[in-house]
């Protein structure tokens, strides 16, 4: 599916921090654990970045080791359940804490750690101040075995893995390409359903050039550090935001707008529902302004002499009657979403060739209440659901979920194919409206592609 399956909520128990990890298949022998679309905090334990692994003939290659020692340990245990193989390599696509702090566990298992040139093993990890002590236990920054200073190819048995310094002048980011699987791990070069962040001195212009380079590579799936999309739409989201940001900031500079005014005035409303927009967008405008103001010339406005006013003879004219105001067009409101019992929904969806959409909430869940309000009041959401879905709602605190469905976080949405009573996708923890709309659209695309949606 274009939307790769779910993200699971994280809990703290008396036995330590449980990340509730679940590997999802991306391609042949390629799997990923998907992070949450928020900032690191005590609730999620820093699980905000995607971590993946590739099975090779005699071991595994891990792409980004995750936020903590405990996270890496839990991921490793799941790999061993799948197949008892050692981890041969760990490749960090970024030097940020959430990409590298699982390295210590994998090093203990005998893995070779490859990292960006800018990897600083002497610094204090900032993540320790954001998550709980039991989540951070045994976690530390360790030196890598090798820093990648130029484009590199490693061979693991019969598999070739290409590591690319995608921006040659930036020492903090790498991409990893596996030609035999047509999978590109783009790291922090791509964000989806989350605003890209121009931090650590990143160049907007060089970032856009790097995205052009990524676009030309012959991959079928791309895994970013943030978000669950894996097709070209993942690339488009980041590319569109950065391109529009550049255009708007250039226009502001050309028109003589100062930096403070640009930060205040420039809004990209089509991205306002993406996660962390309010935190990063204004900072991005400021960073882009600093970079672009050095190369974008301001328009030179030459004053034109004012023409002499001609004195006209006064003429008395009768005032024209005021036109009657046109009646305002009434806004069309989409009918409210109707909910059905599960058996009734399966039957109705079969007959009408729709998808069964199961919404799972729980008691005392403020995010569930927010989703309910969105489903009740947002016309675009109601239109998509009324046309293509049959809705069911259940309470995880009270109801037994059908088809063996288990969710670790609420609210969750389960997409069910009615003719086979098969769960196609589970998306938990939806908070942003833009993410909800994208998920609904992806469900529709997949249903049509598989032929069970009208």
Image (cartoon, rainbow, N blue to C red):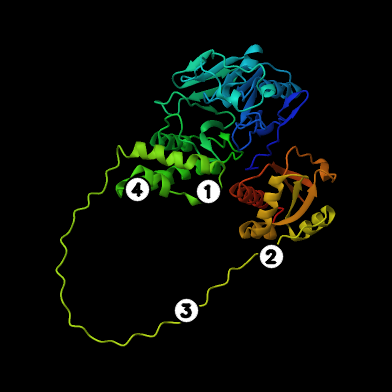
Quickly name the residue at label 1: 272
Q: Gap in Å between the C-alphas at discs 2 and 3?
A: 30 Å
x and y percent of residue 240 in the render? 47, 45
Whether pointer 2 and pointer 3 mark residues with C-beta atoms closer than 8 Å, the reply is: no
x and y percent of residue 167 in the render? 42, 28
Circle nearer the N terminus (3, 1): 1
- Residue 252 is tagged as 4
Quickly name the residue at label 2: 335
Taking depth in this image into account, of 131 and 198 the one nearest to the observer is 131
Residue depth check, mark 4 versus mark 2: number of the one nearer the observer = 4
Q: Is residue 213 above or below residue 303?
A: above
Residue ID at (65%, 42%): 1
Q: Gap in Å between the C-alphas at discs 1 and 2?
A: 26 Å
Instruction: Describe the element under mark 1 as helix, strand or loop.
Output: loop
Quadrant for the C terminus in the image: bottom right
Circle nearer the N terminus (2, 3): 3
Q: Is residue 59 visible?
A: yes
Q: Is residue 420 visible?
A: no
Quickly name the residue at label 3: 325
Residue ID at (58%, 49%): 434
Residue depth check, mark 2 versus mark 3: number of the one nearer the observer = 3
Q: Gap in Å between the C-alphas at discs 1 and 4?
A: 20 Å
Tell me if mark 4 has few (under 14), some (14-19) or many (20+) residues whose alpha carbon lies within 10 angstroms of its own: many
Q: Is residue 414 above or below residue 222?
A: below
Q: Gap in Å between the C-alphas at discs 3 and 4?
A: 37 Å
Circle nearer the N terminus (4, 2): 4
């Amino acid at each position: 599916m274009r939307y790769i399956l779910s993200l699971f909520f994280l809990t703290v128990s008396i036995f330590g921090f449980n990340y509730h990890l679940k590997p999802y298949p991306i391609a042949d022998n390629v799997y990923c654990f998907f992070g949450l679309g928020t900032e690191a905090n005590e609730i999620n334990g820093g699980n905000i970045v995607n971590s993946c692994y590739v099975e090779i003939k005699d071991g595994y290659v891990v792409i980004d080791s995750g936020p903590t020692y405990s996270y890496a340990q839990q991921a490793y245990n799941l790999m061993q359940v799948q197949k008892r193989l050692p981890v041969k390599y760990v490749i960090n696509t970024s030097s940020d804490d959430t990409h590298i702090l699982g390295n210590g566990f994998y090093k203990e298992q005998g893995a070779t750690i490859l990292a960006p040139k800018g990897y600083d093993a002497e610094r204090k990890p900032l993540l320790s101040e954001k998550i709980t002590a039991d989540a951070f236990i045994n976690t530390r920054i360790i030196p890598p075995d090798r820093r990648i200073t130029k484009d590199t190819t490693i061979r693991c048995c019969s598999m070739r893995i290409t590591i690319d310094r995608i921006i040659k002048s930036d020492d903090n980011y790498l991409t990893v390409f596996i030609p035999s699987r047509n999978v590109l791990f783009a790291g922090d070069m791509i964000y989806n359903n989350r605003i890209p962040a121009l931090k650590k001195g990143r160049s907007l212009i060089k970032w856009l050039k790097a995205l052009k380079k990524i676009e030309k590579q012959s991959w079928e799936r791309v895994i970013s550090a943030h978000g669950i999309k894996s097709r070209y739409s993942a690339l488009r989201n980041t590319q569109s935001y950065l391109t529009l940001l550049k255009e708007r900031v250039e226009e502001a500079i050309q028109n003589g707008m100062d930096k403070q005014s640009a930060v205040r005035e420039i809004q990209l409303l089509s991205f306002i529902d993406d996660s962390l927009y309010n935190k990063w967008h204004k900072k991005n405008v400021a960073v882009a302004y600093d970079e672009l103001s050095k190369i974008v010339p301001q328009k030179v406005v030459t004053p034109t002499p004012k023409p002499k006013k001609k004195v006209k003879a006064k003429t008395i004219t009768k005032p024209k009657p005021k036109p009657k105001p046109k009646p305002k067009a009434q806004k069309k409101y989409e009918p409210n979403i109707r909910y059905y019992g599960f058996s009734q929904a399966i039957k109705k969806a079969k007959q009408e060739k729709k998808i069964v959409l199961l919404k799972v909430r729980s008691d005392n869940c403020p995010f569930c209440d927010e989703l309910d309000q969105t489903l009740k009041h947002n016309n675009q959401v109601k239109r998509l659901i009324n046309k293509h879905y049959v809705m069911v709602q259940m309470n995880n605190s009270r109801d037994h979920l059908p088809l063996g469905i288990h969710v670790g976080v609420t609210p969750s949405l389960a997409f069910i194919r009615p003719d086979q009573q098969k769960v196609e996708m589970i998306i938990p923890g939806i908070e942003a409206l833009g993410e909800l709309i994208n998920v609904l659209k992806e469900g529709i695309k997949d249903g049509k592609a598989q032929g069970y949606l009208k």
